């Protein structure tokens, strides 16, 4: 995968972790408004043991590759927006959050909980168990707001014993206002968005999808944050693997990716 030219830093940069040709397509389709921002592509396409489940040796190699881009609660790496690739690689969220060395909260929008039991042992991180792994091992992560699975909102907090426990769970139907469910987060906040939370009317992925629109997703994020909550990083995953989509799917997905980046630029207070 070709490196993308580095522009003068004006807005938060985009770090793309490329596991499939779909990640390169994000830029080649011209859907992201990249002018005036740095963009960096990390090419993992030839790495083995990455699809869905992450091999320990590959995990260490990826950790080394992203080490120059740590997520911090103060200004640090200019690459605060992470385009991960398709949902099979959502475990990258855990690797990015592991670079945070101060207490923070996670706001996650997903049609799945990503808290499954590990099919090949708890030590092997996957796209289906990464959040459970992070809640167990990352003690800088103090609170998790999980929005979307089964049209529910779930709130997890770390107790005095260091365990992450379910504190509340309430309905979150499309069109609802999250601030009426849980109080807004004060920050610092890390945001993770899996676009399978959206209906196929708005975006196409390779996984079962939710019933939300893009405006629902934007409303969930905005109303889940206090006015001055600092966003320390945001990652986005989802889409169809190469060869699995029609040209109309590519066009639809590209248009939404551009709108999502514009929303991030205009509505979020990224540190």
Image (cartoon, grey):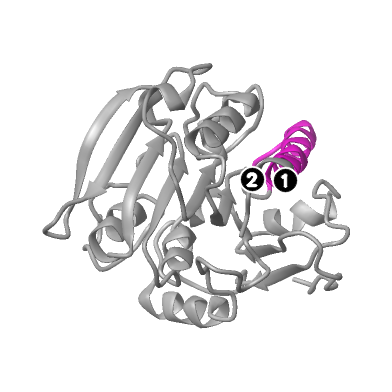
Residue 35 falls in which quadrant of the image?
bottom right
Mark drawn on residue 268: 2
In space, the residues marked 1 and 2 are separated at their CA atoms by 10 Å
Residue 233 falls in which quadrant of the image?
bottom right
Q: Is residue 241 above or below residue 177?
A: below
Find the magenta span and give its range: 243-265
Q: Residue at x 54, y 53 (%)?
A: 230
Which badge, 1 or 2, is on the more N-terminal residue?
1
Q: Is residue 129 visible?
A: no
Q: Where is residue 63 shown, x and y percent of the image?
A: 48, 77
Q: Where is residue 247 shown, x and y percent of the image?
A: 79, 36
Q: Where is residue 23 shown, x and y percent of the image?
A: 69, 57
| Magenta segment, prevailing SS (helix, strand or loop) | helix
Instruction: Using residue 123 as the reference point, say whether residue 144 is left or right of it.
Output: right
How crowded is the residue under tag 1: few (<14 C-alpha within 10 Å), some, or many (20+)? some
Residue tagged by mark 1? 261
Instruction: Using residue 30 as the reference point, say whether residue 86 is left or right of it.
Output: left
Q: Residue at x 62, y 43 (%)?
A: 240
């Amino acid at each position: 995968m070709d490196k993308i030219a580095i522009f003068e830093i004006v807005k938060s940069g985009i770090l793309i972790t490329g596991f499939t040709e779909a990640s390169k397509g994000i830029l080649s389709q011209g859907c992201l408004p990249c002018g005036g921002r740095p963009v960096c592509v990390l090419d993992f396409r030839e790495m083995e043991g990455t699809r869905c489940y992450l091999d320990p040796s590959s995990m260490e190699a990826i950790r080394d590759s992203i080490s120059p881009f740590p997520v911090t609660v103060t200004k640090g790496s200019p690459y605060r927006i992470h385009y991960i690739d398709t949902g099979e690689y959502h475990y990258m969220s855990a690797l990015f959050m592991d670079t945070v060395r101060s207490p923070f909260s996670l706001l996650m929008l997903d049609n799945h909980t990503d808290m499954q039991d590990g099919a090949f042992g708890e030590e092997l991180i996957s796209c289906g168990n990464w959040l459970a792994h992070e809640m167990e091992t990352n003690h800088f992560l103090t609170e998790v707001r999980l929005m979307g699975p089964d049209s529910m909102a779930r709130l997890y907090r770390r107790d005095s014993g260091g365990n992450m426990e379910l504190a509340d769970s309430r309905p979150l139907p499309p069109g609802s206002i999250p601030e009426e469910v849980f109080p807004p987060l004060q920050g610092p906040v890390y945001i993770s968005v899996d676009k399978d939370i959206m209906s196929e009317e708005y975006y196409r992925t390779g996984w079962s999808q939710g019933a939300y629109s893009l405006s629902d997703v934007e409303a969930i994020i905005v109303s889940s944050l206090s006015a001055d909550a600092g966003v320390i990083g945001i990652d986005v995953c989802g889409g169809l693997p190469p060869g699995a989509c029609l040209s109309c799917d590519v066009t639809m997905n590209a248009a939404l990716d551009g709108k999502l980046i514009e929303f991030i630029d205009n509505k979020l207070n990224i540190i």
